[in-house]
Amino acid sequence: MVAAIIFSVMLIAGFGWFGINILKIRSNILLGRDIDRKDKPGQRWKTMALVALGQKKMFARPIPALLHLGIYVAFVITQVELIEIITDGIRGSHRIFMSSLGGLYTLAISIIEVLSVAALIATIAFLTRRNILKLPRFKKPEMKGFPTFDANLILVMELILVTCIFTMNGADEALYLKGASHASHEAGSFGFAISSWVGPHLFGGFSVETLHILERIGWWGHWVMVLAFLNYLPYSKHFHILLAFPNTYYSNLEKKGKFTNMEAVTNEVKLMLDPTADPYAAPVADATPQRFGAKDVNDLTWKNLMDAYTCTECGRCTSSCPANITGKKLSPRKIMMDTRDRLVEYADGKRKNGKDYEDGKSLLGDYITEEEVWACTSCNACVQECPVNIDPLAIIVDLRRYLVMEESKMPTELTGMLTNIENNGAPWQFSPADRGNWIHED
Ligand code: SF4
Ligand code: SF4
């Protein structure tokens, strides 16, 4: 009875706190400007199914893709066992579905156990890649400190979770063989794929009392790790487990390389070209002048901000970025990490001090430098590579737009090119009248 009450309190507190954090992240994302991504629902569902559920883009690199798939499938399927843990926890029962599901129950737990072993192997491989093999993309400057700790912490949590599952099932198997399991007072075997073999080897020599304690440690450990994982997610890059789905659904479906028009400029041009427009008409009363481009996170769209929360920090974008490869300061992964960090700081400031609060900082300048912004070749390789359809280039372009249109700041090479376009209709220094001169050259 006491255990059931403790369990229920943990359940309500754990899921309640998670819910509060989800709402907080939602309101942070909605600080971004509006953008319409409701068109072509069929194509959007298909993109989500292929990219988020099917992990299509991950398979460009098959080995990490298979390891990731192992953890991902195990994570999803083991949640089935969680249904039983929650039901048992509230009711004070033990393996409540075993008698009603019979062979199906054995099959379900066996699948979970096999997948848990796959997840265990993948987790060890990921820890090895990060900490022993030290893959270059995990050692870039933006990965120092918390990002590396975060990645390792989640992997360690997964190890503990899998250990708890096998401690719980293995000790219970040993108890069942002695006719002392709470699941059945008869002696027998559960017949689970892994623990029915491993359990007696590991735990067979322990007394019934010790086995009951071990089984409970595994069961409660599993439950505590689930709640810890759930409530750590919103602070971690692993939040992509949830956001990958909406983020790929709301992907940019336009052809890569097609730049968006700036609404304010488009309206201005339309006005200039419209012979019936009144150039002296008063502006709409509640129209707030919009900034050209983006200086801070609130100038970006909600999709840019959702991208930032979805970034898995895998570094595939950075490892294929020509600017980064050739030693420039730019890393598209850092662009996304900076955007998320600044968004959290900006939103927390508003939440604590009121919506008019300004902290005097901005994404451009305090987080992302002009040098980084101008190092981009706008090649779209980062967009192409991203396994969850994030678009770092969209943010870079808006930061550039702000620099050019609001601050008239740009590299001298660009100033010359833009002057030439203005004067000559082409980026070169020649007059349009001289364009045909090459015909007369020997
Ligand atoms: S678009 Fe820019 S940031 Fe992205 S890969 Fe190309 S150069 Fe790098
Ligand atoms: S933007 Fe995409 S590719 Fe780059 S680190 Fe984030 S998830 Fe990985």
Image (cartoon, grey):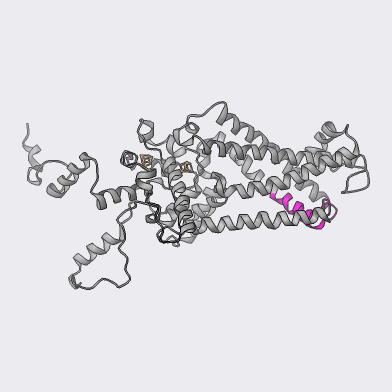
Coordinates of residue 185 in the picture (x, y in percent): 93, 47
Residue at the extreme top of the image, as rendered: 132
Q: Is residue 91 left or right of residue 359?
A: right
Residue 96 lies in the magenta-colored region = yes
Whether residue 301 is visible, yes or no, is yes
Residue 4 lies in the magenta-colored region = no
- Which quadrant does the N terminus fall into? bottom right
Number of dots carrying numbers: 0
Coordinates of residue 277 in the picture (x, y in percent): 20, 72
- Which quadrant does the C terminus fall into? top left
Q: Is residue 102 left or right of residue 224?
A: right
Residue at screen point 44% across, 34% down:
319
Residue at screen point 57% across, 29% down:
131
Magenta extent: 79-102
Q: Toward which corner of the image does residue 66 lie, by quadrant?
A: top right
Coordinates of residue 137 in the picture (x, y in percent): 47, 33
**Dominant secondary structure, magenta:** helix
Nearer the observer, 277 or 349? 349
Q: Is residue 151 left or right of residue 171?
A: left
- Residue 329 vertical position relative to residue 336 in the rendered view, above or below: above
Residue at screen point 21% across, 39% down:
413
Residue at screen point 85% across, 53% down:
99
Whether residue 77 is visible, yes or no, is no
- Residue 135 vertical position relative to residue 272 in the rendered view, above or below: above
